[in-house]
Amino acid sequence: MKILEIEGNRNLSGTIRVSGAKNSCVALIPAAILSDEEVTICNVPELTDTDALCEILNVLNVDVNRASESIVIDTKNMKNAEIAEEYSKKLRASYYFMGALLGKYKKAVMYFPGGCSIGARPIDLHLKGFEALGAKVTNEKNKYTVETEELHGANIYLDFASVGATINIMLAAVKAKGRTVIDNAAKEPEIVNIATFLNNMGAKITGAGTSTIRIEGVEYLTKCFHEVIPDRIEAGTYIILGALCGNKLKIDNIIPEHLDSLLSKLEEVGVDLEVGQDYVTVSKADTYKPTTITTAVYPGFPTDLQQPFTVLLTQVSGKSKVVETIWENRFMHIPYLNSLGADITVKNQTATIFGPTKLKGTSVVATDLRAGAAMVVAGLLAEGKTTITNVEHILRGYEKIVEKLTDVGAKIESKEI
Ligand code: UD1
């Protein structure tokens, strides 16, 4: 078992270079199989989630060539195959193969996806979208078969602006006959990144980044070269860390516009920020003001930064609140923050944080990916030693986290026990 050991309460300075976005990359890799030629994706982070998707590419007999930061995917020998449960359940994003295989072969067979236990995580909106495009969906003991003779364009209204459903329907629709319109589509930057990738291959998608996406089906997709956008959640996590422990800590290789809601909230709290064209420099201030954050779809405050932001709120003078509206089970980090010395109560979907409180190192658990990130931030802030278990969750989403933090002065070690 892997653990992280942190000696906290140190000033961090220097530069952290942000990696390619996990949530973009995990959709780009399945999307690549739609091409009829070879595609190259660069700025690919080394994460266990991207490794898991490459294993699925192997199952489908796709040629994958991985260099340090890029990946070349060639489908010339590809064969459609059932994606066994052991692969499907390794991560949430395995479900993008459902849309991509349906789009390419008019048939996909796989199991219910895995991912963090942060809520019920149904896939009904994805399946309704596939059905609207003409597919028949059957489900037997968690095994989904989605198939049709021919996919046709359709008007699809999403009851919720789901990131996953928007991307999956785009993947299924790019080669469908005729025009598909997705209304109430999600607007996250990752969706724009996937649509640009598909358009680079010859797809005809307009409106990505707005709530109406239009897709004109095409028959053939060509080779292309594409870059993964910087990871706004990794960037946000390190900016929050800088607000707690930074001394001119520079978070580099980012798109600050993707972080507007976070940066506004940090300014409201009183964090010392310098926002450049592709970086943010952040230093710890002596006192912070309380605030309320409410998670929402993009461009609202991202649910994925709610947990690390809660750590910052433990250092604010007075009463702050975090309202979680996206996932029903995203406060699992709170008992562990309290065991480190925080004073937080949770009622329904709201956490109330009283601060400032001194944090002192102890043993904590990374219950999910972003809760794990919150534990790292808390451990770096706390006095003494913090030990984090279930570290595999963190490694799914933060590339070279130990190396990056060590380089800016943190005392953090990964150990096998
Ligand atoms: C993606 C991100 C995740 C982030 C989330 C919200 C990836 C790999 N993961 O997850 O980090 O927290 O967006 O920004 O990109 N829903 C349904 N039915 C569906 C689909 C979703 O009811 O068919 C609900 C979910 O239960 C949830 C909400 O919609 O309450 C948001 O889900 P969605 O936007 O789909 O999140 P993911 O794509 O799973």
Image (cartoon, helix red, strand yellow):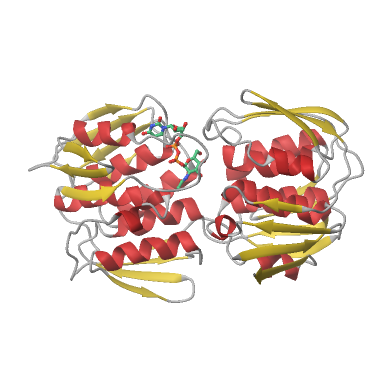
Q: Front-most of 216 and 147? A: 147
Give coordinates of residue 130: x percent, y percent: 23, 37
* Residue at x 25% of width, y 54% of height: 202
Q: In the current view of this chain or complex, which residue is farthest to the front?
A: 417
Q: Is residue 223 left or right of residue 233?
A: left
Q: Residue 218's spot in the image, x, y percent? A: 18, 48
Above-or-below relation of 259 to 124: below
Residue at (86% x, 34% y) in the render:
355
Judged left or right of residue 355, residue 139 is left
Between residue 383 and residue 212, name the one nearer to us: 383
Residue 349 on image: x %, y %: 61, 25
Q: Quadrant of ligand 1?
A: top left
Residue 222 quadrant: bottom left
Residue 54 on image: x %, y %: 36, 65
In the rendered image, the residue lying farthest to the right is: 286
Q: Is residue 85 left or right of residue 274?
A: left
Q: Is residue 92 visible?
A: yes
The answer to whether 406 appears left or right of 397 in the picture is right
**Is any part of residue 275 visible from this angle?**
no
Quarter location, residue 8: bottom right
The quadrant of the rendering that contains the N terminus is: bottom right
| Residue at point 36%, 38% (across, down) | 166
Quarter placement of the C terminus:
bottom right
Is 143 or 298 nearer to us in this picture?
143
Q: Determine the residue positioned at 64% across, 55% down.
A: 278
